[in-house]
Image (spheres, rainbow, N blue to C red):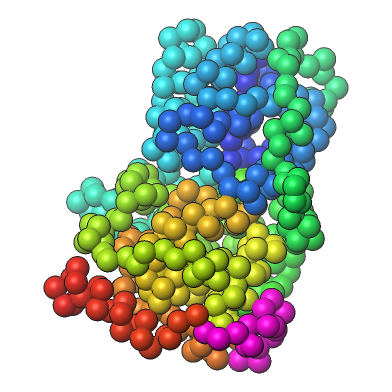
């Protein structure tokens, strides 16, 4: 018998429940990845993410080949493509790890039903979060809206499941499935930028793939999570884990990170809570599927956002605002596809509160330029900063870029590295004036609160 394992945001062979289920059954296996940019509600990935996906699929192809599993690449709506590949492979089973966005859940549920009706055994598995979103609830049975009690409930629950082993390497000696469907050529998908090729900075900063994910994790744990707890807000210091894109693409599972981290000594709680925030973003998206496009706090539907100005937007996007920390962060983002988390908050606060621009516009830029942008975390974090999200920072909490630089980059090393010319620029906007304007705007929707 043949099983089709449908890969999505889980581009690994270790701790892959859907792949392990196929292996336990001793089936022939065909791996499938579908580039679906057509299904209703599915958001096409941004430019930096497309670069990462190309290289991650190259790495996955090699890893699967080493255990005798071919990877089939197809482009099109999953509702159409998956049954086609199942038929071409003569498969009797299909397995995949679950997704939690509304459109993706609709696609998966529809496919599961139609495949089963056609006599194909279809199953889904948990694999991309520490805990399934429906397993944590308040005493009243409703979803949590604030992180701290949510995380407390998670810690009081059972330990996240132990990671599953990678499939047996002796599979490579087998004859393989009797029928392997034709695959697209990865290069034909055009995921890499060409005219111009702006990806040199991404290539200098990142090596996508499962093997590198494990190297990055071990390097981080060797420095110790205790250092992370002490220095994670200092952008000039390499104290963060750099795991976010590997988790976003599922080149390493959060369960692998969790269990490997608890095996080391030192203060692990702060770092592990960041895995909790990642889960909470997916948890919130599951329970509030409108989060990517609608304010979770409905008061903000009436918020008087400023009309976007092309020159202002360009100054923010490319780091020429005259605010050193903002400019450094935005230039780091443009060049490397990432930005230090503390600086992300400062840049997003400046955008939504000093420039008074709609969070959805800023989120769209991050979506296009971050290698780790995912539907849950990107929109959750932008709404959190804007003050309209779940567990939101109060709107009147406005990050002052100058104060933040004095506190977290007092020697100016981070700004000097990424935006040394920023000090010579006139500030795009007066911070005190823009703060007063933001608070007055919030007063309009909150009755003066």
Q: Can residue 387 be seen in this view?
A: yes
Q: Can residue 386 be seen in the rendering of this structure?
A: no
Quadrant of the rendering where the N terminus is positioned: top right
Where does residue 185 sit, x and y in percent of width and height? 76, 27
- Relative side of 200 to 233, left or right: right
Q: Is the magenta stretch mostly helix, strand or loop?
A: helix
Placement of 326 over or under 1, stated as above or below: below
| Residue 393 picture quarter | bottom left
> Residue 275: where, in percent of width, then height?
52, 59
Say if the magenta span includes residue 425: yes
Seen at 63% across and 65% down, the residue is 333
Point out the image quarter for the C terminus. bottom left
Which residue shows up at 37% across the image and 71% down it?
A: 356
Q: In this view, does 112 lie above or below 448?
A: above
Range of residues picked out in magenta: 410-427
Q: Does the magenta stretch include residue 260?
A: no
Residue 173 placement, left or right of 168: right
- Asked if 75 appears above or below 312 in the picture, the reply is above
Judged left or right of residue 49, residue 80 is left
**Who's the residue at 49% across and 21% down the image?**
79
Q: Please state the horizontal and vertical placement of residue 264, each as a whole percent of the image.
A: 65, 66
Q: Which residue is at 41% across, 63% downward? A: 308
């Amino acid at each position: 018998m043949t099983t089709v394992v449908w890969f999505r945001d889980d581009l690994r062979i270790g701790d892959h429940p859907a792949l392990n289920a196929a292996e336990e059954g001793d089936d022939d296996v065909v791996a499938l990845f579908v580039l679906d940019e057509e299904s209703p509600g599915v958001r096409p990935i941004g430019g930096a993410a497309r670069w990462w996906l190309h290289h991650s699929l190259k790495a996955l192809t090699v890893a699967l080949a080493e255990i005798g599993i071919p990877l089939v690449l197809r482009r099109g709506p999953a509702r159409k493509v998956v049954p086609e590949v199942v038929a071409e492979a003569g498969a009797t089973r299909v397995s995949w790890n679950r997704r939690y966005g509304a459109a993706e859940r609709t696609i998966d549920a529809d496919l599961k039903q139609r495949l089963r009706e056609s006599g194909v055994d279809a199953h889904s598995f948990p694999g991309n979060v520490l805990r399934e979103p429906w397993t944590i609830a308040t005493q009243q049975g409703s979803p949590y809206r604030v992180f701290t009690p949510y995380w407390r409930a998670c810690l009081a629950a059972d330990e996240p499941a132990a990671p599953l082993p990678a499939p047996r390497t002796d599979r490579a000696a087998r004859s393989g499935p009797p029928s392997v469907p034709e695959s697209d050529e990865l290069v034909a998908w055009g995921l890499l930028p060409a005219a111009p090729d702006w990806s040199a900075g991404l290539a200098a900063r990142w090596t996508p793939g499962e093997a590198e994910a494990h190297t990055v994790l071990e390097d981080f744990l060797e420095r110790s999570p205790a250092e992370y707890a002490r220095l994670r807000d200092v952008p000039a210091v390499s104290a963060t884990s750099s795991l976010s894109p590997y988790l976003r693409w599922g080149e390493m599972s959060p369960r692998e990170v969790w269990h490997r981290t608890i095996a080391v000594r030192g203060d692990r709680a702060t770092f592990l809570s960041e895995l909790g925030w990642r889960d909470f973003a997916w948890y919130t998206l599951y329970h509030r599927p409108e989060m990517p496009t609608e304010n979770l706090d409905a008061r903000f539907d009436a918020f008087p956002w400023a009309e976007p100005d092309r020159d202002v937007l360009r100054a923010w996007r490319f780091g020429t605002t005259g605010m050193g920390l903002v400019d450094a962060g935005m230039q780091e983002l443009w060049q490397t596809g990432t930005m230090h988390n503390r600086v992300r908050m400062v840049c997003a606060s400046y955008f939504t509160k000093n420039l008074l621009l709609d969070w959805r516009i800023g989120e769209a830029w991050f979506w296009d330029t971050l290698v780790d942008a995912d539907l849950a975390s990107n929109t959750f974090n932008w709404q959190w900063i804007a003050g309209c999200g779940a567990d939101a920072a109060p709107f009147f909490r406005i990050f002052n870029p100058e104060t933040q630089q004095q506190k977290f980059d007092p020697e100016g090393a981070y700004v000097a590295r990424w935006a040394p010319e920023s000090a010579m620029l006139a500030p795009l906007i007066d911070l005190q004036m823009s703060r007063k304007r933001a608070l007055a705007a919030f007063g309009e929707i909150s009755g003066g609160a």
